[in-house]
Image (spheres, rainbow, N blue to C red):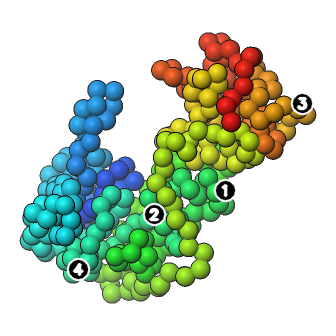
């Protein structure tokens, strides 16, 4: 990487608030651009993996690797359940005298008392074309809904849920085979580039804000494991989108003879044979074809409990699907 000329580039003092990999990508980009990350806020370590050991978030892992101070308050609300913790966090935020706070998938609501601390307030990297898909799961919901496009919005934060004025926006198409995993990676890279460009414009005093349109607001509610169970009375096209939307988390599944089978890849299949929703119409090397409320679903990659993801050919060698049907 070519060193930055500190005589011609103004570097900002940034508080960075984020938790998952999506946020870590932008943090890495800001760090590489030469900005001074004076403090990182991230969620407390959570149990993860088969051993349920405490695991640091991707943002924390990057911060520790680069000697960036980290704070993990459970709350930032002075009027909440942990006022002492929140007060200590507020004191810390003020002490670093940051120019701006950049927020990406942090996981805690920022009260007005926090939004007002940095000189330029708090700027959010949001993975949708606002005001469509405000909320927790914009990538999942865009795929599930069949949107043709999505993108990233850089937004000045206010107290409402993703309601703040827009500073920058860029769209990209959702490919027919995009999963939440693949689209996440594209949007994380896009957001990382956009926030670096936005802060450069902010330094130059050229980052105008535009209010979000009042029409066409939608909300991306948090994904639950319960909604990942497929209902085969729905159209095959709807189920195929859900499989892509819930890949890699929480993983769409169907229940066959009381066994939960996860579906990782599938496509709409026009099957001439009749069958009630949930019926297995055929199961061969090309896939498992299941009757739906409209058309059929051909599942090409499956997983049984405790097993690995397998293409249909290999899966069927160890799991018979000839007799029985999927629960609706």
Residue reaching furthest top? Answer: 318
- For the C terminus, the image quarter is top right
Residue marked by disc 3 = 273
Distance between the alpha carbons at the discs numbered 1 and 3: 27 Å
Inspect this view and state whether residue 94 appears.
yes
**Horizontal placement of 310 versus 19: left or right?**
right
Inspect this view and state whether residue 310 appears.
no
**Horizontal placement of 126 versus 96: left or right?**
right
Q: Report the number of discs.
A: 4
Which of marks 4 and 1 precedes in the sequence?
4
Distance between the alpha carbons at the discs numbered 1 and 2: 18 Å
Which of pointers 4 and 2 indicates the residue nearer the eye? 2
Element under label 4?
loop
Residue marked by disc 2 = 135
Please report contact status of discs 1 and 2: CB closer than 8 Å, yes or no. Answer: no
Element under label 3?
loop
Please report contact status of discs 1 and 4: CB closer than 8 Å, yes or no. Answer: no
Please report contact status of discs 4 and 3: CB closer than 8 Å, yes or no. Answer: no
Mark drawn on residue 116? 4
In the depicted structure, whether residue 223 falls above or below residue 295: below
Distance between the alpha carbons at the discs numbered 3 and 2: 42 Å
Residue reaching furthest right? Answer: 272
Residue marked by disc 1 = 146
Between residues 269 and 190, which one lies in front from this camera angle? 269
Which of marks 2 and 4 precedes in the sequence?
4
Distance between the alpha carbons at the discs numbered 4 and 3: 63 Å
């Amino acid at each position: 990487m070519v060193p930055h000329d500190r005589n011609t580039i103004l570097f900002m003092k940034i508080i960075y608030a984020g938790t998952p990999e999506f946020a870590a990508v932008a943090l890495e980009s800001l760090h590489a651009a030469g900005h001074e990350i004076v403090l990182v806020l991230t969620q407390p370590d959570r149990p993860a993996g088969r051993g349920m050991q405490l695991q640091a978030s991707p943002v924390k892992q990057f911060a520790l690797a680069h000697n960036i101070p980290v704070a993990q308050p459970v709350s930032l609300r002075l009027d909440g359940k942990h006022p002492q913790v929140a007060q200590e966090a507020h004191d810390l935020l003020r002490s670093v005298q940051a120019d701006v706070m950049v927020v990406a998938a942090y996981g805690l609501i920022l009260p007005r008392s926090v939004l007002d601390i940095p000189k330029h307030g708090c700027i959010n990297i949001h993975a949708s074309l606002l005001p469509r898909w405000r909320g927790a799961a914009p990538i999942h919901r865009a795929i599930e809904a069949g949107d043709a496009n999505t993108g990233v919005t850089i937004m000045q934060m206010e107290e409402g849920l993703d309601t703040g004025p827009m500073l920058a926006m860029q769209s990209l198409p959702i490919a027919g085979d995009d999963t939440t995993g693949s689209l996440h990676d594209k949007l994380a890279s896009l957001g990382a580039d956009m926030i670096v460009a936005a802060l450069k414009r902010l330094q130059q005093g050229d980052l105008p804000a535009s209010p979000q349109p009042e029409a066409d607001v939608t909300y991306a509610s948090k994904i639950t494991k319960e909604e990942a169970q497929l209902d085969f009375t729905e159209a095959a096209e709807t189920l195929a989108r859900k499989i892509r939307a819930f890949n890699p988390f929480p993983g769409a599944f169907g229940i066959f003879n009381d066994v939960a089978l996860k579906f990782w890849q599938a496509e709409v299949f026009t099957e001439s044979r009749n069958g009630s929703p949930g019926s297995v119409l055929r199961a061969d090397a090309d896939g498992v074809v299941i009757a739906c409320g409209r058309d059929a679903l051909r599942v090409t990659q499956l997983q049984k409990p405790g097993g690995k993801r397998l293409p249909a050919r290999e899966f069927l060698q160890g799991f018979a699907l000839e007799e029985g049907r999927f629960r609706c």
